[in-house]
Structures are given as C-alpha cells and as structure tokens.
Image (tube, helix red, strand yellow):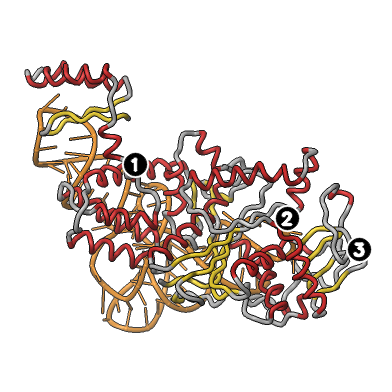
Amino acid sequence: MKVYNSLTRRNEELSPLVGNEIRLYTCGPTVYNFAHIGNFRAYTFEDILRRAIEFNGMTVKQVMNLTDVDDKTIRGANAAKVALRDYTQTYKDAFFEDLKKLNIEPAEVYPAATDHIPEMIALIEKLVEQGIAYKSDDGSVYFSVRKFPGYGKLAHIDFDHQQTGARCAADEYDKENVGDFALWKAWEESDGPVGWDSPWGRGRPGWHIECSAMSMKYLGQTFDLHTGGIDNLFPHHENEIAQAEAATGREFVRTWMHCAHLRVNGEKMSKSAGNFFTLRDLLEKGWTGREIRYVLINAHYRSGLNFAFSALEDARKSLERIDRSVALATEGEAPGWAKKHLEDFAAAVNDDLNIPGAFAALFALVRDTNAHGGGAVLDIFRRMDKVLGVIFFGQSEKKSEDLPDEVKKLLDERAKARAGKNWAESDRIRNEIAALGYAVKDSKDGQTCTRK
RNA sequence: GGUGGGAUGGCCGAGCGGUUAGGUCGCGGACUGCAAAUCCGCUUACAGCGGUUCAACUCCGCUUCCCACCUCCA
C-alpha cells in the first residue's frame, strides 16, 4: 500500500513502525458548531484511509482529538452564558451522530483537549526547561521557532528568505519573533470563567500543543501516520512537529497525509457566499448519509472536490444501480472474473487511495454480475465495501418485506388482468400501486413489487 | 512577492508517453404488450501556443484562467 507523504512529497510504502499496527492521529473538529461537509471531506478521507489499512491486513489505532477550548468555543460559551463544557458537549454529541450517518468507523480514542491540560503543561515545561520556549511579560508562553532548526520542513518553507505575510503584521503579542506561536495563553478578560492554573499563571493552552501532547500520550513519541486538511499543514502541523521533536529529540511522525479542500459549485465554501452546508442541512433536504459519503469519497483526496447537488443526484442513481446488482449476488466461491475485479480494486486502493479507480472496478463487477444474471460474488462486494462503506446489503430483506393488504389485493387483480392480456387494466393498476408508493416490475417470473 | 496544486467529453471525475477509466445524462439497438431493469453500441474529451519524441492528454517552455497556504479555517 503506497501513500503520498507530504513530508517527502513522494509516494511511499506504508508499513507499521511496530508490529502490524498503524498508529494514526487525525486532527478532529473544534466543537463550537455543527461540522460542515467540507470538514467531513477530511473525516471521510481519514475513514477511507483506516479502512484501506485494514483491507491490507493491518490493524489501526486511531486517535482523533476534540478541540473543546479555543477562541471560538470560549466566545460561543460565554455568549450563550453556559459553561464551556456544556456548550461543547452539544457539538461533540452532534459530531458523533454525524459520523454515524456517514458510516465513518469510530476511532479508538477521542481525547478532548480539556481533559489533557496536565499533559500539555508538562510538555510546555519541558520546552521551557530546554530554553526553546519562553514566557512573555503577560504570562503567555511562546515557542521560539528560530531555536528549532528543522522548522519549515513539512511546509517546505525557507524562513530565512520569507517575507512576512500581511496577516501577521499586526504586532499585538509580546513575541520575540513574529513566527513564534503560543504554547500557553495568559488569561484575559474575554475568557471569562475559562482558565486553568499553570506554572505561568492562569490561562489556557495554545491550539497546537494539544495535538502534540495527546498524540504522544496515546500513540508514543514516534508514530506512523498523521493526517488532516491541507490547511492544517501550515502552521498547525509544522508547529506540532516543532513542539514534539524539540521536546523528545526524536522523529515525531513518519508519514503525513493531507486532503484538499471542498468547493461548492466551483466556489470556495463560505457563509457569506451562501454556499455553506452542514451535514444536517443536506439530510434535511432528503439526501442520505451514504449518498453524501459517495460524493465525498468519489474524488481523489488530494484533488479539490467540487460539491454540487447534481453530484448527489448522480450518487443516488449510481448507488441504486449497485444495490440492484448486489441483490443478484449470492454466497459461494467467487468466479474468476469477479476475482479479477477485486484485484483491480485493491491495486487502485493501494495506489495512494485511488477511490475513483476503485469505484471503476466496483462498476466492472456490477456490469459483469448483471450480465451473468447474478453469481457468487457477494463476498467480493463485501470486501470492496470494507473500504468504501457505501453498499446497502439489505436489498433481499427489502424485497421480502410485507406489503400492505391493499397493495397485495391490487397485485392479485393485476396478475389476473395480465393473464387475460388486458394491458390497459394492467397499466391502470400499476399506476394505482405507484400512487401508494410501491413500484411494480414485470419479468418472466411474474411481478415484483418493492417500496419506492 | 513566496510555496504548492489545478484546467479532461452536457455534468461529475480517474489516468498514462503508444492499448476502454468509471459514474450520470443523451442517442441507437437487443429484450419487453408497454414500462422499468439489464446488456450491447454511439455521441470521435483532454485550456491556448510552441518544443522534445517514431509517438504527448501524459514530458519541457511560454501564455491565459482557477484554487490553496504564507502564523490558531478540514
């Protein structure tokens, strides 16, 4: 299995550092609001990643953090006049509900930042002791990027020849260097009741430190894989590396993977443009979790994905087609042609998660299965879906589902009409059944009726 | 200004120096009383201009346009 490593900018074989287990840290949500589908592009990408690792016979220990203290959560909680913990709990719960809707496999650990303040303080103390972090007059602690030689190696930025961006021109902090970032932020008025005691006084952790502290706590000082959206590459992940490697003197993460952004109708998703959707927005419009999942995963994770409602419509039809084919599939030893498609599927998945290519193999299986009128390919579908997570295997149950008496009666009448070749009557009854929400299809074996 | 990624058929979206991506839509055929489903075929896609090559959508250069990051956005 090969994946693209942002650190080396090359495709590399992914193999575990220890045993057969890949240790994976995925940057999770800041729980100040409902997550939007752009966020979920990252989470579905990470889900595909862990499923692909498992597909290849390895196990995964995944840690996904919940950022439950930062500017936005504090602002939200204080504005709502509720405790930070209560405020974030709402969005934590919502997040887990959303993950289920998208059929995202749960991570092994979901550490919350506020539950790991001591670990963060310990890490910061280590950095202060080493003289790589310093306390400013206001009680904040900063990381001195100049003192960490490898700074910029992930983002491939040469800071000696870098002009200062417009956004960091404002000199509102008491920092030695504009590039220095906060490890600990001193308490200020707007924080209200939020704050923890520390060796540097009351305050709260900087954003980056939680990921370094929590990932190392659960996965070790050096672990296999760390992922997130491309926007996290710099500064967030760069800073995580700096904090961790400066503290331990060891390599922090071997492989970094980043997914590209989602656009909506060709434009960047933003509230002001009115093209900002949460998962809940789409569910309310009648789209299902797996239709949304299909759209989110059916583009290579490193390519920008253009989200459009027409893509959801395509997804719905594509999934129906897959479902119909799966309903024809049976248990047993798979025929050679099906095994070939699984090989193609695996090759695509193992080529840096080429999911569009994997879907092409799936559809080749669909076509052949239909052409053969079925086959012992259920296991092949199952193995493909182990990675994709979009197939509905309940088709046979849906078929045998009890029909209302009213519909049964109409079907009997229609069968009689058809026996007498009374086509007008047959069509009339078909329409009547359709009006009740059921679809009738005719074949050599007679009528089949399913709920629409 | 720096760094990185893009422009593919109506739409979505892979890919590679020469061999069908795939989905969806549309058209034709088979099957069917009709329909639906299914299968087969078709609509001769690779931003523009040069270059390298026996051969370029794929490599190189230039042009146009787009996107992301450049200090707390997945």
Seen in the picture, residue A348 relative to A130 is either above or below; the reply is above
Chain of the residue where label 1 is placed in the rendered structure: A
- Which residue is drawn at the image coordinates 85% and 63% (left, top)? A198
Q: Amino acid at mark 1?
A: Lys
Secondary structure of the residue carrying tag 2 is helix
Residue A37, how many percent across, how many down?
Answer: 54, 47
Q: In this rendering, would A12 be left or right of A171?
A: left
* Mark sitting earlier along the chain (2/1): 2
Can residue A299 be seen at all in this image of the molecule?
yes
Which residue is label 3 attached to?
A138
Can residue A11 be seen at all in this image of the molecule?
no
Q: In this rendering, would A175 be left or right of A300?
A: right
Q: Which mark is residue A23?
A: none
Which residue is label 2 attached to?
A114
- Picture quadrant where residue A181 is located: bottom right
Chain of the residue where label 2 is placed in the rendered structure: A
Q: CA distance from mark 3 to mark 1?
A: 59 Å
* Mark sitting earlier along the chain (3/2): 2
